[in-house]
Image (spheres, rainbow, N blue to C red):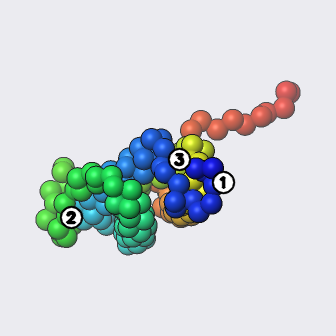
Amino acid sequence: MGILGGNPKDEPLHYGEVFSVWSSLVADYGMISGYQTFYNHAGDEDLKKIIEDIIETCREEVKQLEKILKTNGIALPPASPERPVARLEDIPPGAKFNDPEISAALTADISAGLVACSQAMGISTREDIALMYGQFHTAKALLGGKLLRLNKNKGWLVPPPLHVDYPEK
């Protein structure tokens, strides 16, 4: 059997996989910290629950990504510090993110994360790495669906111009 046969965990990571895992870890560290700040600014309880779900998803990803890098002797990137819990009332109105802004930022990040996971799956030669990113992709897609429903229900969705095909008169 060749170098890329047998147990995938015994195969070496190629540079693209290393970069994908390392970049994902940097992103997750930043998102955990940033979303803790969003949580402090959020007023809507449904939005706060989704933020909690996203932070927990990021933490689960971090565990797997750190393990892969450590196992392969790759230095971990620096992690952002945890953010303290703050009272919404203590944040001045002009300095506060509002709920639709937070939801839009989360939606954009989920969308970018789906693309990043798809790219990582596509470049992977190790099945375990590709499958891990497939799991990340599925989790992000589910969170994206929850955000879409929340945005519609709360009236926060700003759709692009809609194309309506009117028959000629």
What is the distance, in whole Å, between disc 3 and disc 1 at their CAs? 25 Å
**Label 1 or label 2, whichever comes before in sequence order:** 1
Q: Nearer the viewer, mark 1 or mark 2?
A: 1
Q: Nearer the viewer, residue 3 or 16?
A: 3
Residue at disc 3, secondary structure: helix
Query: Mark 2 or mark 3, which has the lower sequence index?
Result: 2
Task: Tell me the distance, in whole angstroms, between the alpha carbons under discs 2 and 3.
Answer: 27 Å
Residue drawn at x 72%, y 37% as measured from the top left: 164
Q: Label 3 amino acid?
A: Ala
Q: Amino acid at mark 2?
A: Glu
Residue 49 pos. (x, y %) = 40, 72
Residue 82, numbered circle: 2
Q: Nearer the viewer, residue 24 or 57?
A: 24
Residue underneath mark 3: 120
| Mark 1 to mark 2 CA distance (whole Å) | 46 Å
Q: Residue 38, how many percent across, how many down? A: 29, 59
Picture mark count: 3
